[in-house]
Image (cartoon, rainbow, N blue to C red):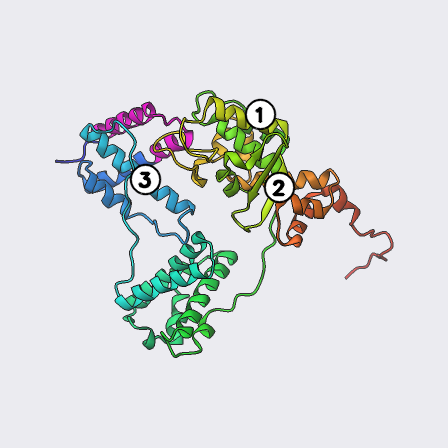
């Protein structure tokens, strides 16, 4: 059979209608379906074959989907496309009647038994050191890529690894046009791995780390915030959204308490003392305890979500998914730009992420005259110098620091 574009687009339309009946009305999801439809249609047209699950998975697995972090944008997009293919197949078979999980293909791994064993040992080593599981996974992903490069060069044993082999990896396309911060982060993980090899007797070459590039330099972060108009647009009611009240509660928590997104997603009923009007948590990033006040507007938004929108379930987590299996809200479940669609704020939003509210919270405290130690304490910083980055956002006081040029001699001369 040959590819029939009209039939394929009808299948996509029916699939979208079924998904909406199951509860998905997010602009983000529906817009992604439109993009996926065009991409998959172009692929099927190029091979001139009708859509099947096998053909669809062949297409989606050919796309770049091997990021350093499972939460990177490219991986999230690939997972969504993978799910889209399965939804089309379910609709085609007439079985798209309820939500289910679709397992994606596993990432390619080194073929050498030696490399596999050492990579697993390195992962265990990182966990025993107390490293965050997501960070450890990112480190192992960086190492896995380097090991696969070695295999392509015919190297399958660490004892045969030389300095020029390590240096050659950084000449590959992976490191072309790489941002400084990403380069430094990957170097850190690879250096830790090479030291692990030496310390555990997998190699006797003591100079492997010397083959890593020496990257010097730093990047100044520009602190981005939202203004009152953007805030109003993001908080505006979206009655057609299944997560309208949840979005508003999450936004106000970040904007009025400065909590990190990971801590908001992990918030439990017992973490809020409604009588004392405080939140008491142990921070995910630092492991330090944090007690912060919660204002009446934010309290009301959280209560409104719990009573009028949150799904009935046994979980003690406050924020849970709105459709599909009931589970903890993940990072990808909260995106802010779609709430600003149709307004001037959409193009003015610096980026699409919850952390911008935390920055706005800190900036407003600074502009109101709060001392830096108090701001640092509210943000839960373990390093008190971290708050210094927000000084640049107080334009009024920054102008007071400008040097007076009136006493600098200046004369006109011709050259």
Q: Is residue 200 visible?
A: yes
Within 10 Å of disc 1 (Cα), the crowding (few <14, some 14-19, many 20+) is: few
Camera-side residue of 116 and 125: 125
Where's residue 272, x and y in %? 56, 34
* Residue 276: quadrant of the picture: top right
- SS of the residue at dot 2? strand
In the image, 190: left or right of 94?
right
Q: Where does the image place residue 209, in percent across and percent down from the top left?
A: 45, 72
Of residues 178 and 87, the one drawn nearer to the viewer in this rendering: 87
> Would residue 140 appear left or right of 97 to someone viewing this image?
right
Q: Residues within 10 Å of mark 3 (few under 14, many from 20)?
A: many
Instruction: Determine whether 59 is above or below 173 in the image.
Output: above
- The numbered disc on residue 78 is none
Tell which circle, 2 or 3, labels the residue nearer the N-terminal end: 3
Query: Residue 6 location, x and y as percent?
Result: 22, 28
Q: Which residue corresponds to the image point at 58% horizontal and 47% vertical from the top-left?
A: 289
Q: Position of residue 294 (x, y in %)?
A: 62, 33
Marker disc for residue 291? 2
Q: What are the residue bounds of the magenta stretch?
A: 6-35
The residue beneath circle 1 is: 300
Residue at x 44%, y 71% (from the top left corner) = 195
């Amino acid at each position: 059979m040959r590819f029939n574009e009209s039939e394929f687009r009808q299948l996509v339309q029916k699939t979208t209608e079924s998904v909406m009946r199951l509860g998905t009305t997010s602009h983000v999801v529906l817009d992604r379906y439109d993009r996926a439809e065009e991409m998959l249609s172009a692929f099927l047209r190029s091979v001139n074959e009708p859509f099947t699950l096998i053909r669809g998975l062949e297409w989606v697995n050919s796309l770049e989907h091997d990021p350093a972090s499972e939460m990177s944008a490219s991986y999230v997009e690939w997972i969504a496309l993978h799910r889209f293919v399965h939804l089309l197949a379910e609709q085609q078979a007439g079985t798209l009647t309820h939500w289910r999980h679709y397992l994606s293909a596993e990432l390619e791994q080194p073929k050498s038994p030696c490399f596999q064993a050492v990579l697993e040992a390195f992962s265990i080593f990182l966990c025993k050191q107390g490293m965050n599981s997501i960070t450890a996974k990112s480190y192992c992903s960086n190492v896995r890529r380097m090991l696969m490069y070695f295999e392509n060069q015919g190297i399958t044993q660490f004892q045969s690894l030389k300095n020029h082999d390590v240096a050659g990896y950084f000449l590959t396309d992976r490191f072309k046009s790489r941002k400084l911060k990403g380069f430094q982060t990957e170097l850190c993980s690879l250096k830790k791995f090479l030291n692990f090899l030496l310390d555990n007797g997998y190699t006797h070459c003591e100079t492997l780390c010397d083959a890593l590039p020496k990257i010097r330099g730093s990047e100044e972060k520009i602190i981005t915030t939202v203004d009152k108009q953007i805030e109003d647009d993001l908080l505006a009611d979206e009655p057609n959204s299944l997560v309208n009240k949840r979005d508003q509660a999450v936004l106000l928590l970040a904007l009025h308490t400065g909590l990190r997104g990971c801590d908001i997603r992990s918030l439990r009923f017992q973490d809020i003392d409604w009588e004392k009007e405080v939140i008491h948590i142990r921070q995910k990033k630092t492991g330090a305890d944090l007690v912060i006040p919660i204002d009446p507007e934010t309290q009301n938004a959280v209560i409104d979500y719990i009573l009028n929108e949150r799904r009935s379930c046994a979980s003690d987590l406050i924020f849970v998914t709105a459709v599909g299996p009931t589970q903890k809200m993940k990072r990808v479940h909260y995106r802010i730009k779609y709430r600003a669609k149709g307004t001037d704020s959409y193009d003015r939003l610096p980026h699409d992420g919850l952390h911008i509210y935390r920055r706005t919270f800190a900036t407003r405290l600074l502009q109101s005259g709060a001392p830096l130690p108090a701001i640092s304490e509210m943000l839960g910083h373990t390093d008190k110098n971290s708050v210094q980055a927000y000084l640049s956002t107080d334009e009024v006081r920054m102008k007071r620091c400008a040097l007076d040029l009136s006493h600098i001699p200046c004369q006109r001369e011709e050259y």
